[in-house]
Amino acid sequence: MNQVSTISPNDILTTAEQWRWQIGHTFHEQLMETIYTEAAEIADAAVTRPDSRPRFDLDRTIDRLVTSRLWGFPMMVLLFTLVFWITIAGANIPSGWLSQLLIDTAHPWLKSGAAAIGMPWWLSGLLLDGMYLATAWVVSVMLPPMAIFFPLFTLLEDFGYLPRVAFNLDNVFRKAGAHGKQALSMMMGFGCNAAGVVATRVIDSPRERLIAIITNNFALCNGRWPTQILIATLFIGGLVPAYLAGLVSALAVVGIAMLGVLFTFGVSWALSRTMLQGEVSTFSLELPPYRPPRILQTIYTSLIDRTIYVLWRAVVFALPAGAVIWLVANIQVGGSSVAEYLINVLNPIGVLVGLNGVILLAYVVAIPANEIVIPTVLMLTVLVTGAHHVGAGAGVMFEMQSEAGMITLFQNGGWTLLTAVNLMLFSLLHNPCSTTIYTIYKETGSAKWTAVAALLPVVIGFVVTFVVAQVWRLVAG
Amino acid sequence: MPDPGMSLLIFAVIAGICAWLFWPQGGQFWRWQQMRRLTTRVQHEDALKHIYRHQQHHRFATVSSLAGALQLNADAVTALLGDMVSHQLVTMDGDALRLTPRGQSYALHIIRAHRLYERYLAEETGFAESEWHGRAEQQEHYLSPEEADALALQLGNPTHDPHGDPIPTTSGALTPHGGVPLTALDTEMPACIVHLEDEPETVYAQLVAEDIHPGMEVRLLESTPQRVRFWCDGDEHLLAPVVAANISVRPLTQPSALDGVAGERLSSLQPGESGVVLGLTPACRGSERRRFMDLGILPGASIHAEMRSPGGDPTAYRIRDTLIALRREQADRIRIARAAPGSLDNRTELSSEQMGEMYEPAL
């Protein structure tokens, strides 16, 4: 008893301290290792496995085929080309229906309805020409491709093929300091950047995940394909004989998309060596067994989780954008509209980088959705050039069916081939849409990385278009 | 419209200035920031560390040794020391400099902050190993004792930094690693690396390049004034004596089961070959180590190389019935014993006793 009472708490602490030094610094790890090993031994003792493997292992056979040196890459290219072709070809028809229904039919009907109940022109303009039309536009352009692309992609994922793509491509991404799974988020980004940013969740290494998030915007998204295709058809296709026009303009669009991939690698490389070098990097890639895809379930979940989710966010952001577009075109200050003032302010900067004030203003008001850039550009060009015989009035976005009519309108607006090329470049290299920015903030939880992801592409965009414009003018004289 | 040639020129000049200012590592802006950090307080703290280190080796720091360490001229050092004496940090006894108790505890705080921060960099960031020391040299001046305590708590009160140096406790207690230089070891005597000296930087970089880390087992094979040849963790290494002297080791009473085993790394397995995991190398730390353990890459687990990516890297390994792809540099951090070719059940000749011995803590 005597002995016990002489030990004070301090003595215990001192003894514990001494023992800590003696145990050595690998103590925690050894403890952890033994716990894991114990667990594995218990499992091994309790779980029995069939002695021999089946002679024909289907998984291994598929794996050998899809990761073979000879067939691995061609199969990948073929499969993704097919997915994109189905998406683009298949989306045209429902997109046309939707636009027929929501824009050509419902919009005039709503307008006449509003007039019938005596709604003031400014209210029906703001609500119907602004907010309704912007939202209808986003839905009709965005919904069909996403409703096709996401389920197809999810089916490949569900089957187990996508991890093999990451496995095949990892070496290329490793050289850029990134993770092979970035191939998947990039691919998803071609559908929608917001969905691509969400898809980076599969990357478990913090540094590589941030790289994938920040560079996802360089994947040309679904909302930007129509802009690229339209401008390439009008301006690039017009340079060559008619029978080559389709091919050349398609090549131009693919070239822009490939340029985006190059930027993905370049920016990934630079980021991993500068801003992100202190983030933790751990690579591991699980290759799950193949399993037959559950088609109906996959279609259902990908529609609910990805398509509806992204669409809802886009709609939420498109409503105020539509209002702003209508207001800038209709609020008159001292004889001309706010839009005209803004275009005059932005025009010198626009001309310096080979664009113009109309395009820059369109990109500012269309931050919520890339889909409405072209309709906004058309509406603003009409407003500026005063070509009132086309279009549907100030602040009302529209699209034109006739290519010749559009090219005349653009030429009246002062467009040249340089404007077209730089618009294609700027469409690739500008800030992500607000849906994507919001998603990046949700995913990273950091204002700093959100700002980097939003500003880096737009800075690169201005530098690239500026240099192209100056060199072009030097060469063309 | 401005002249395009002129605009390009102006742009090139602006881009050049930005690169000159902000280029990673070499940029003038970063240098200027670093210069600003060299305040009197930082100089005081660096001087305290220098004197403390000399006292540890039972020598006295002098004005000239301090001048050399801080890269200042003698006048500046004398002024600095006068200031430190008036703050009761140092006493001057002729030429010899001595720390007062106050100076001693201040020096220990700086060392604690430095080693804790190195540990933090090793465990929780992705900076390269060669950068740890330099970054900790800067950060040590900015951690208050409270912040150092919070960092220690976050890291689970570690006892050693990643080089094997003990981290002083808040009370200043410190048990030296007690190792002897590798060069002083008897040949064929099994020993365990307890410490790597991280200064000078070039010598340390060489050790990092050789993949030598505290916690590895060594056996000296040959030591001549020209070269030191030793066995370490499954490989034979050859170093200049001046480099090898920076490795401190503690003799082991008995060699462990792995002594002399030609330890192979997982990366040496070709697709179709199998092995048994012996363990993770000490170079594998922090979240990567935890991740590997989560995946079941633990001593005794059998592992089979299934296929290699058409790009040449990574390789997919089957472990515990799961296919996991690992890159070459990661597979380099997993030690294995190769299974005899043709053995279908993927087991090696390593007996269970030998496996058991491997878990004995290497004290």
Image: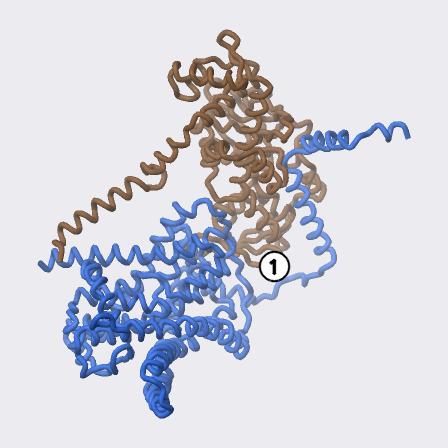
Locate the N terminus of chain B by quadrant.
bottom left
Q: Which element carries disc 1, helix, strand or loop? A: loop
Quadrant of the rendered structure where residue B220 is? Answer: top right
> Which of the chains is blue?
A
Above/below status of A268 relative to B137 = below
Above/below status of B300 relative to A404 = above
Where does the image place residue A383, in percent across and percent down from the top left?
21, 75
Please tell me which residue lies in front, B263 or B94: B94
Where does the image place residue B82, in percent across and percent down from the top left?
46, 15
Q: Colour of chain B?
A: brown
Locate the C terminus of chain B by quadrant.
top right
Chain letter for the residue marked with disc 1 in the picture? B
Please tell me which residue lies in front, A119 or B162: A119
Q: Look at 38% across and 32% down and name the residue there.
A: B36
Where does the image place residue A65, in percent across and percent down from the top left?
46, 65
Q: Is residue A89 visible?
A: no
Q: Is residue A86 left or right of residue B169?
A: left
Above/below status of B186 relative to B29 = above
Q: Kindly identify which residue carries mark 1.
A: B321
